[in-house]
Amino acid sequence: MNKRINVLLPEETLAILDRVAEKGERSRVIDQALKFYIEKKGRSNLKARLKEGYRTRAEESLDLASEWFDLDEEAWGGKAR
């Protein structure tokens, strides 16, 4: 089901749209462009969230390794094994 909306576009954008879209196909081209944009934004946001998550996990892993290293040193009295 389609729904009619009013959208204001700069003249330059409309000129590009008219060059790309065949006559009577503006709505389809705009629909595809919006879906592409939304999907790309979603992927970009996901990548940013994953990157931040990896960074957080790496910091936690380093902290944990440091704690274990200190405990290991303490247990062995700093002696080589």
Image: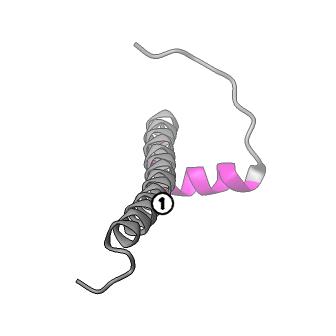
| Pointer 1 residue | 63
Residue at the spot 43% in from the left edge and 49% down from the top edge: 43
Residue located farthest toward the front when viewing the structure as drawn: 77
Query: For mark 1, does the 10 Å Cα neighbourhood hold few (<14), some (14 to 19), or many (20 or more) residues?
Result: few
- The part of the chain drawn in magenta is 12-23
Task: Give the overall secondary structure of the magenta segment.
Answer: helix
Q: Is residue 66 above or below residue 21?
A: below
Q: Nearer the viewer, residue 61 or 69?
A: 69
| Viewport quadrant of the N terminus | top left
As for residue 22 lying within the magenta part, the answer is yes
Q: How many marks?
A: 1
Residue located farthest toward the bottom when viewing the structure as drawn: 80
Residue at the spot 45% in from the left edge and 16% down from the top edge: 2
**Amino acid, disc 1:** Asp
As for residue 29 lying within the magenta part, the answer is no
Q: Is residue 49 left or right of residue 65?
A: right
Residue at the spot 75% in from the left edge and 35% down from the top edge: 8
| Viewport quadrant of the C terminus | bottom left
Question: x%, y% of residue 36?
Answer: 44, 46
Question: x%, y% of residue 61?
Answer: 40, 59
Residue at the spot 73% in from the left edge and 42% down from the top edge: 9
Q: How is the image coloured?
A: one colour
Q: Nearer the viewer, residue 59 or 21?
A: 59
Tell me the SS state at disc 1.
helix
Q: Nearer the viewer, residue 52 or 64?
A: 64
Question: x%, y% of residue 77?
Answer: 38, 75
